[in-house]
Image (tube, rainbow, N blue to C red):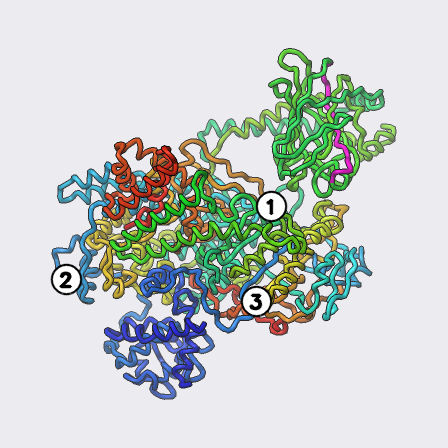
Amino acid sequence: MNDRNEWLKTITRRHFFRQSGFGIGGLALLSLLDERLFAAAVEGSDPNPLSPKPPHFAPRAKSVIYLFMAGAPSQVDLFDEKPKLRQYDGQAIPEEFVKGERFAFIKGTPKLLGSPYAFKKCGQSAAAISDLLPHIQGIADADWPHFLKASGHQIVGRPSMGAWVTYGLGTESKDLPGFVVLLSGENQPDGGKSCWGSGFLPTVYQGVEFRSKGDPVLFLTNPPGVAPEDRRASLDTLREMNAVHRSDTADPEIDTRIASYEMAFRMQTSVPELTDVSREPESVQRMYGVEPGKRSFANNCLLARRLVERGVRFVQLYHRGWDNHGTSKGDDIVNRLPALCREVDQAAAALVRDLKQRGLLDSTLVVWGGEFGRTPMNEGRNNSQYLGRDHHPRAFSIWMAGGGVKGGITVGSTDELGYNPVEDPVDVHDLHATVLHLLGLGHTELTFKFQGRDYRLTDVHGKVVFPLLA
Amino acid sequence: MRSMLVAALLLWPALARGAEDRLDFARDVQPILRARCTRCHGAEQQRSQLRLDSRTGALRGGMSGAVVLPGDSRGSALFQRITGVLQPSMPFEGSPLPAEEIARIQAWIDAGAPGAVDVEPADKRHWAYRKPVRPEPPAVADTAWIRNPIDRFVLARLEREGLTPAPEANRETLIRRVSLDLVGLPPTLAEVDAFLADASPDAYEKVVDRLLASPHYGERWARPWLDLARYADTNGYEKDRRRSAWMYRDWVIDALNQDLSFRDFTIQQIAGDMLPGATTAQKIATGFHRNTLLNQEGGIDVEEARWETLVDRVNTTASTWLGSTVACAQCHNHKFDPVSQKDYYGMMAFFDNAEYRVQGLGEVVTDKWIVEPDLELAPPEVLAKRDALKAEGEALKKTIDTRDLGAEMAAWERALGSKPPRWTVLRPDRFTSAYTAALEKQKDGSLLVSGPKADRDTYTVTVRTPAAAITALRLEALPDPSLPANGPGRSSSGNFVLTRLGLRAGSETIPLVRAVADFSEDGRSVAQAIDESEDSGWSIDGQQGRAHTAVFLPEKPIRAGGSMTTLTVTLEHTAGSPGSTLGRFRLSATSSANPWGAVAVPEEIRKVLDTPPAARTAEQTKTLTEYFRPLAASLDAPRARLAAVRRELEKVQIPTAMVLRERPGSDRPSTLLRVRGSYMSPGERVYAATPAFLPPIPEGRPASRLGLAYWLVDEENPLTARVAVNRSWEQLFGRGLVMTSEDFGTQGEPPTHPELLDWLATTFTSQGWSAKKLHRLMVTSATYRQSSRATPTLLERDPYNRLLARGPRFRVEAETVRDIALAVSGLLSPKVGGPSVFPDQPDGVWDNPYSKDKWTLSEGEDRYRRSLYTFVRRTAPYPMLTTFDAPSREFCTVRRTRTNTPLQALTTLNDPAFFAAAKALAERVIREAGPEPEARAVHVFRLATARRPSEGELAPLLRFYRDEAARFAGDDAAAWTMVANVVLNLDETMTKE
């Protein structure tokens, strides 16, 4: 192969992305996006900013299902077993740990709180997993590793990971959004819709919430009295009239509009079909524990599988309620935590199994985790009689399965009390870098210019956690 | 992947060939090199002794010889490096150049590296940092086309490119375009007809002047300004509480309508509070910088939260007035533009001297946030009334909290020991749930709740009023095996939160004055079930699984008779975690004069009572007194009065505006530099100063926020006027002369018409910074009046219309999409200003765990106000607006994106609000046009587009009408609604053409 072809190939793989105008890099995409909607149509190619775009390099995963446990689950009760913590239960935490620390609610010197739950060593990695999660114990085999990570930050207004990924890769689905959000548990996550917002990225990349009440997608249903044939006839009329004007004005933008109305029409059929989990065989429904018609994590897990089957790029599930401070029986680790585990355990494990059975696990990355961890100490706000833990940004656990991650390993560890990471800590930016890497995106290359800065999902941090890769 | 490779190969030669025709170093290559290479190979650094900031430098080469061999790109090191053929590839350790740029450089080299011989410019600063010099409008060949000097600049370029301008747009198109541009609304048919009939030579100018004088002009031009100002009606972050910001929004509309000079518009928003004898309006203007996000989350560092607002104020000021992006200098010196980190904190210092205080709620010290000043805008008598009520309330509170109750308490203690009263169970006759829970009567007269559980529910129970006068009502919360954790509540832990217990006899509301319970969770006493708050209530967490009793006393005994034959008890559950409703309960009444004995006294009180009064410690006496205080009858009157005072206080409406107020003292404002931009790493103290690469604060002005304001609009400032006129151009033409309107720095795009930009900027300032004069100038130009129709050749030649050989054609912005539908259908309310409104919005958009705030649909015309009045909640923006690319207003947005998506199509097709507009439009057409379908079809089309449909458009519309009329079997309004729905969705309806 001569060198011209060689570099053309390089260009193709690494830069077609930009060349096609949906890319990233030094030029301001804000403008390119607009202009390419124009220009691409002139060239007769697809003007849809959500069209699939080639990754930077060969991807291992095509889709991500992120099971976001909003409120932050307690890692020391679920994945990070600490016998010493149990041994010193009730004693004040040594001063050196908490000197200069700033807690959200803890005052004074808190007391250590051992986990009241038993753990089992599971799978090849012999990772210890709490008995609160019997189903997840059961899949803790070759399919998934789990690891600990430390320190994360959230800044309101930054684009969410799903928005970044959809911006980078578009979506394979012609009649579904690229980034879908599913909610269960107590209401919405903190921060409302900005959790899946596009931040400074174009709003076309924001997550589309599939609602469990009413229309799954806003305004999907025709107004009362308008039958599908009325809608079809009205769209035909619209298309015919728009086409006349297209030839009068020669504006290719009109083609884009016509196409968007046709996709809207397809969504009117495909989305209700998709969201109807009762169409699944009973055995599958049982495996997940779904209750058709209800808003539940199990339903959403099954729905997530149906979404990635249809080419949706990023599915984010939120299950809220893990903010177990122990201020009352309703948010403690003795009553509330086991209930939450029951709500998610079976379905999360079923999702991994189901994806595996269908051969989808190789191309789908499943991530389970919250926004930070919980303290190894009891919070004891206002001398509460209930056991609970405060926010802990230093260490927490996340597990991943499928999508090119190596099974049965654990990356990183914490000290005897589970307070600080001691080995191979994985930063939240590292997690993001790794997820992007698995999708074939270089985290330093996926940039967007805003206020004069090339912003990245990983900001100025992040390194790919190579030991995690299969 | 393979098909894309093929696509790239095919595309390649086309790109290269097309660009070869007229290549020029300065225009085609220099911008690329400047953006990509000159950081290391430029004026500051010459790695490998190579400079790429001029053609001479590029041809001269570096340490290892020539890098450009004219005519031989393949042999040129420059080309080999940027393609990676030669290692290390360039840019060194950076992202490779986009293929389009590589192609341009390749084509330029192959064309022989053409370009003018470099002339060393006298002033080496970046063009935007040099003060604009007023250029002479150039001479052109076709002078007949020229309407004003703008056209000379545009035509000169077109003539140079061998292009001719498009013909003038027809009158329907023109009046619709200029109406949408100047007032954001389509023209009425009367306006269209008047314009069509006006044969005078200045017919168009008359339309322009009418629009400039319209009160809707200010609304339309406030829209982009409010994006810059990140205007919103809530604080953002998790709790996202409401704020009173609309007076600032109205100030903007008013200032634009008054054509306040952009100079004063700027000064007042940055430092109106510091002007001598500042007026109320000038103070309200400072709301611009109060629109920052406000973090009120528990556990935050409030000083850091305030610092974040300062960061935002610096970034927003730079984006809005300087078209400059300084955000990167928060952490380090700007890599490309001459903004140092010190410059950044020098700017921040201007804002660090504004007043604020820390406020907290309750005793939990973690719940603190920053409070900046509010301006109370009410007549003095209203303020005086408020102050009097406040004072009275405080006095009453003091009485209630401190009055000595010795004798009364002793009597109560004796009564406690006496015989318990007799209670009669009130057997419910009717009982309902406001939601769909099932209430079932039990043998013992209690009600057991089952079935679907709502987050919030209210039970209503009606009983016959007993014959004997009622002195007290008793509520028993009872356990039951069917309930979670045996109840008595339905929450997962068996708890409930009773927000309010209401009592009516017949239709008369009976005030309940006292309540006592055998047990209450800390902070959720039973008194909260008879207070005004919807966020508090009685709950029993910690003692689930057992029966609990509460007794409520009416103001005076209730006697049966008259209309009071029935008693209605309402049990509201709106506080606590969702679904904390009662699971089983029973109501009873007594006529005993001494109802207290019915309630078991909480354990700690029992202990005190068991101790003889003389033996009690001071602590014990205090505990007992505090327990008794809410029960003391002697305090009923002050308590009732206090409740009334509080109700009255709530009724006193005092509009407030958020403002900046400078801390007193004459010290030069300063702030601490933060190392690597982190609040946690304070560095040296930096004093207020403008960036070193721009002129200093004008002589005689203070180094304060006020000085900054004067500096922004000083005639020596090279940026402000250019940035402002460019944004106006962008609004009218769809794209700025500097396309990157947010970045005039070296990383932004250079202007397509640099002289025109400077001419406009200098004209703007010399005409007193009048936006209306500027807009008039632009929209009366021949350039603006061109038809937007493109020829295929022109589309290929200039797809983005950079050369302006045709008029603008763009989908209108989110707010205008909705405003057009409202205006065309006749629903739109013309009301200008006032508090934000709540038009139709789908249920559930506002669900938020940390806020009980509700979207309460506005009434009457407020449902149909212009979209800029729609309440902006940052964490749950109005879905329709977001779908059409409106930003969330968390940060300053200079330029919105413009997308077309299926979600937009679903919105305008199916959103009940849009369908209601279609319905109203159908009714309007039936009312206004004759009975002939054709007349109606023409009318509906004209209303939406201002023009008559062509045959090719009318035919499908009429055919559709007939089909729908047949389907709806004679329901003509329904058929026309479908037609109107189509017309409102036409590309042309949503497009400024």
Question: What secondary structure is marked by label 3?
Answer: helix
Please tell me the numbered disc located at residue B139.
Answer: 2
Q: Is residue A88 above or below residue B459?
A: below
Asked whether B473 falls inside the magenta stretch, the response is yes
Seen in the image, is A407 located left or right of residue B628?
Answer: left
Tell me which chain the residue with mark 2 is part of. B
> In this rendering, do the residues under marks 1 and 2 share a single chain?
no
- The residue positioned farthest toward the bottom in the image shown: B64
Q: Residue at x 37, y 46 (%)?
A: A233
In terms of secondary structure, where does tag 1 sit?
A: loop
Q: Which mark is residue A293?
A: 1
Quarter holding residue B29: bottom left
Which amino acid type is shown beneath numbered disc 1?
Gly
Q: Could you tell me what secondary structure mostly forms the magenta stretch?
A: loop
Q: Which mark is residue A10?
A: none
Q: Which residues are magenta?
A: B468-483
Looking at the picture, how far across and down is residue A406, in whole percent? 64, 71
| Mark 3 belongs to chain | A
Mark 1 to mark 2 CA distance (whole Å): 72 Å
User: Which residue is at the front of the view, A128 or B296?
Assistant: A128
| In the image: residue B447, left or right of residue B961 | right
Give the image location of residue B459, x and y in percent: 65, 30
The reply to whether the magenta stretch includes residue B961 is: no
Kind of residue indicated by mark 3: Ser
Residue that appears at 29% across and 72% down: B28
**Residue B591 in picture, x, y percent from top left:** 75, 17
Q: Could you tell me if residue B499 is visible in this image? A: yes
Nearer the observer, A242 or B833? A242
Q: Given contact means CB atoms under 8 Å apart, are the residues at marks 1 and 3 in contact?
A: no
